[in-house]
Amino acid sequence: MSTDLTANPQAATEVHRYAEALLTHLAANGTAPPAAPGFRDVPGHWLPPAVEALVAILAGDDPLEPLSRAAGRDQQRTALFLCLALAVSGHGTRIHASWLGTAFGELSLDRPVTHGQRALWLAAARGAYGPAGKIFVLRKLDALAVGEHADPEQWVQALIPGEPAVVVPASLVDFPEMAEIPELARPAQAAARLGRLRKRCAEITSARQADHGSGAGGSAAASAEDEPVVVLRSLIGPARPAGPMASLNAYLLEDLRPGADPHLAAIALHVAAPILRGVAEELEADSRLAPPDTITVPLLGHRILLRPEGPDAGSLEAAEQAIVAEGHAPRGRPWTVIAPAVAAVACLVGAVAAGVLLLAVAGAALLGVAGWLAWQRRQAAESDARYVAARVGELKELAEGAVWALHAYAREADTRAKQAAEDSAELTRLVRRGPRAA
């Protein structure tokens, strides 16, 4: 403040009390309190004459004298106070054209946006100052050429967050792992992203401002959390701690996110228009990329080269050999069968030579064990053979199916390219219309 109000505590209390009452009335019904201003001027301080000027404007009287005194003491705060107070009261069109420029000051990519600038930005975006106010903010933003210093990916992520990591086209639903192959993934991902961008831009430009309230804080729609009201309260004091300020880019990116204020989103989309046109061109070009004639795909853990006429015989044979090698477990010599068989023979020979019945029984039992182990070994070998045959058959079937899926993907390419061209043209048209289309 230009002069510390603590030098005159009684006058400060009177000014603050009336300013608070004035702000409450403005937010409630757009008028000043019925009682006449009951405070004294504080020499050197801008707020008392600024309040007088505001009351005169609302009453339809000439505000020139108090306005001159207030501007002489602090021109920018006076202008900011009047612009925001008139916006909150629903009389934003009564501001003088020069006040908005004085109150707003200069934007910069290198400095945070002040709370006052953000409040004016919000009020103008909501139409509080009429078309001229919105155009004023647009020109301020255009002058900074934000697009020349922006990372396009950041803006795309702000518009359409939460994109799927992999886009699986209809032709590859049965082979989702093929959708991760870069040569196939890039066109599908580009076309899907372009479609989502078009949809989000259509949401922003088709939003009706009338559905979300007309002025920045018109009548009872104003809330204590509304930026213009918060800034007004900080202006009239006593001083309140201000929240953190954000950069211009941070505000614009936040305004583009789904769920943001549609008025601010329309302004941010206007700023993002040059960025999005370039992104749309790149995505359209990527969506037109022709699928490769041959491609190597992972099937059952093996890499198979696919050609238009069918799977490559060499890669298929190598995969089959690997399946055979993996499917037949090395078993070595059948010692588990030989040992009990030899022992059984020895027992039987001993039983015959010695005439001991117990040895004959033991030999027979060992012979049975040897036979059972031999049968188990044979069953395991047959099981391995069946497994290998099944895996080889499955691999061949998958390879044939993958070839047909590639043919279907190629047929989809024309449709995908046409849709991407339509989405790109529509997106360009939407961003060209700008915030006045909202």
Image (cartoon, rainbow, N blue to C red):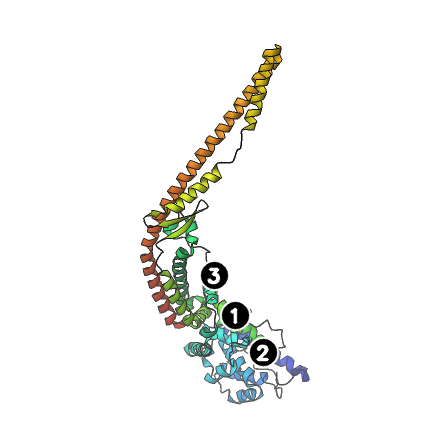
At label 2, the amino acid type is Leu
- Which residue: 55% across, 25% down? 338
The residue identified by callout 1 is 250
- Dot 1: what SS? helix
Q: Do the residues labelled 3 and 2 touch (CB within 8 Å)?
A: no
- Dot 3: what SS? loop
Compared with 324, 370 (above or below) is above
Dot 3, how many residues are within 10 Å of its Cα: few (below 14), some (14-19), or many (20+)? few
Q: Please state the horizontal and vertical placement of residue 268, each as a whole percent of the image.
A: 45, 71
Cα separation, mark 3 vs mark 2, equals 37 Å
Q: Please state the horizontal and vertical placement of residue 332, each as a whole percent of the image.
A: 53, 33
User: Can you tell which of label 3 and label 2 is closer to the viewer?
Assistant: 3
The residue identified by callout 3 is 161
Compared with 54, 189 (above or below) is above
Q: Please state the horizontal and vertical placement of residue 159, each as a whole percent of the image.
A: 45, 64
Q: Is residue 438 visible?
A: no
At label 1, the amino acid type is Ala
Kindly indicate the quadrant of the structure image that contains residue 192: bottom left
Judging depth in this view, the residue of 104 and 5 nearest the camera is: 104
Judging depth in this view, the residue of 4 and 342 nearest the camera is: 342
Left or right, 120 with respect to 169, comes to right
Cα separation, mark 3 vs mark 1, equals 15 Å
The residue identified by callout 2 is 235
- Dot 2: what SS? helix
Judging depth in this view, the residue of 144 and 264 nearest the camera is: 144
Left or right, 200 with respect to 220, comes to left
